[in-house]
Amino acid sequence: MAALKLDPVPPSAEVLARKSGYRETVRIDFAGALAGEACVEVREMRIAGDNHYNTPRNPPYYLSVPGSIAELYLRKSVAAKLGEVNARLKPMGVEVYLFDAWRPQAIQRYFHDVWFPEWIVQRQPHLAGQSLIDEVEKYWAAPTAGENSPSPHSTGAALDLTLMFSDTRQPLFMGGIFDDLTEEAWTDGFEGKDVVSMSDEEARANRRLLYWVMTEAGFANNPTEWWHYSWGDQLWAKLGGHASAHYGGCNPTGRPDA
């Protein structure tokens, strides 16, 4: 397992180019065996985590996001695969820790339409129109646009996570906070830079470990976010060359506004 820390991750720019158009071009197999699979609360399957958007102790936001939920829902098969990842990590004394899983559309709209565009414009006031949208959508997918184009987190197949030590629950250092939406957050953010400090070396090694243990379990990584992985959604299908996605949108809460 330690050898995974030595293997560089693929260049994020190349993966980002392959990601283009995944919601418009990838078919969802609504007749497939997994299409109607139920979601489970991952902590009931002994997978650790807390919903980052539901607590005000959530830098860089410091507010409980309107519409957020406390639960961490994933499709049953996706959660089972995380259990397999944990089994592989166990000899290292490490396990996964989730920040986010299934996400209500209220959260997607808030960050895609309001919070992140405002954050960008404050720092890059020259961006507007389609250029601003393009920058936003490097990190925040547009809210669901019909059943054939769900935002990844609305499918129950996408999740945000890190690694932590099982005994102390201390997170492994990844070189930046969750949702730090800049190029430093790209999965290869420590591959192309001069690594001159122990912190840089640790972040690079831990991102590699997370990347390889997840992708070798079948997950796909969003290349602009070291924390985002999915199995069975349209992004997974596009990056993995699969004929179709397993999952469309779902609503494990039963709330009509979710």
Image (cartoon, rainbow, N blue to C red):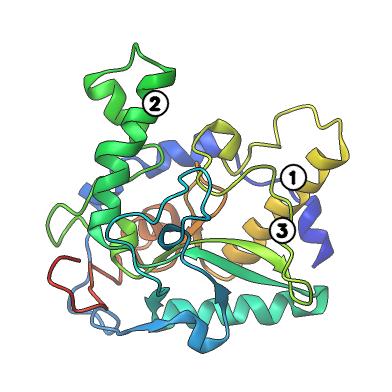
- How far across and how far down the image is residue 47, in percent? 57, 79
| Residue situated in front as seen by the camera: 180 or 83 | 180
Q: Is residue 89 visible?
A: yes
Q: Secondary structure at mark 3?
A: helix
Contact between labelled residues 3 and 1, with CB atoms less than 8 Å apart: no
Dot 3 amino acid type:
Leu
Indicate which label's residue lies in the foreground, 3 or 2: 2
- How far across and how far down the image is residue 99, in percent? 51, 62
Dot 1 amino acid type:
Arg
Dividing the picture into quarters, in which one does residue 36 lie? bottom left
N-term mark: 3 or 2: 2
Q: Name the quarter where the N terminus is drawn.
A: bottom right
**Which numbered dot is residue 209?**
3
Q: Which residue lies under the disc numbered 1? A: 204
Q: CA distance from mark 1 to mark 3?
A: 9 Å
Circle 1 residues within 10 Å: few <14, some 14–19, many ≥20: many
Q: Secondary structure at mark 2?
A: helix
Q: Which residue lies under the disc numbered 2? A: 120
